[in-house]
Amino acid sequence: MPRIGVLIAESAPHPFTEAFRSGMRELGYVEGQNIAIEWRYADALYARAVEIATELVQLKVDVIAAHHTPAVKASMSVTSTIPIVMAPAGAPVQAGLIKSLAQPGGNVTGLSSMEAELGTKRLQLLVDMIPGLKRVAVLGARTDPFTRPYVQDFQDAAVRLGLRLQPVLVDGPR
């Protein structure tokens, strides 16, 4: 029976879990009947994600479905042979997860969240809604590799729109 390792960067319960199960059922895969799924949650801790990815490799899973950029990075740090499916990951080229969207290279493929490229549109909407807007804060996770391109896109957009941007980077959910 094929075995999938699912590494979710956040805590359980997480909406991705049921969405994944539902998608697999639509494809004819039923957990425990014709596929085994090893569910793991990193609780937003990168070091924990690396430990879990190592455990999944030791379990000899056939593929790792990594939910969000830290889970993909953690999986990449422990295997270059087991396929890793981003489900999704943000700014995968900028975060160094893949070489390009057309030809990812390596053992990583999957879905990309293109949120990092929407900073201009988001800030423009704020400017349109709040006349006289001068300063905006953007919240990001210091430990998430996606944060750097995400904040950089906002910084570039803020310069173009004449705004002051204040990045606020946090270490975790608390």
Image (cartoon, rainbow, N blue to C red):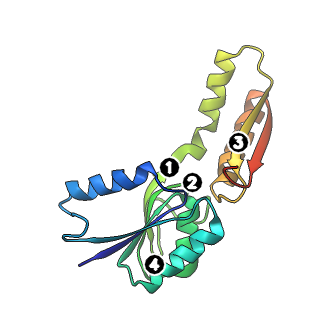
Q: Are marks 2 and 1 in contact (CB under 8 Å)?
A: yes
**Tag 1, which secondary structure?**
strand
Q: Amino acid at mark 3?
A: Leu
Can you identify the residue that label 2 sits on? 91
Q: Position of residue 74 (x, y in %)?
A: 57, 71
Q: Using the numbered discs, state the Cα–Cα distance from disc 2 to disc 1 in whole angstroms.
A: 7 Å
* Residue 157 image position (x, y, % from top left): 70, 36
Secondary structure at badge 3 equals strand
Residue 18 horizontal side relative to residue 49, left or right: left
**Label 4 vs 1, first from the N-terminus:** 4
Which residue position is annotated with label 3? 139
**Residue flagged by tag 1: what amino acid is it?**
Ser
Q: CA distance from mark 2 to mark 4?
A: 25 Å
Q: Amino acid at mark 2?
A: Ala
Q: Quadrant of residue 126?
A: top right
Residues at circles 2 and 4 in contact by the CB criterion of under 8 Å? no
Measure the alpha-carbon separation of dots 4 and 1.
Answer: 24 Å
The amino acid beneath tag 4 is: Leu
Of circles 3 and 1, the one toward us is 3
Q: Which residue is denoted by mark 4 in the rendering?
A: 56
In the figure, is residue 73 to the left or right of 101? right
**Quadrant of the frame with the N terminus:** bottom left
**Secondary structure category for the residue under label 2:** loop
**Depicted 146 relative to depicted 158: above or below:** below
Q: CA distance from mark 3 to mark 2?
A: 16 Å
Q: Residue at x 45, y 75 (%)?
A: 107
Of discs 4 and 1, which sits in the foreground? 4
Q: Earlier in the sequence, mark 3 or mark 1?
A: 1
Location of mark 1 (residue): 113
Where 19 sits versus 3, above or below? above
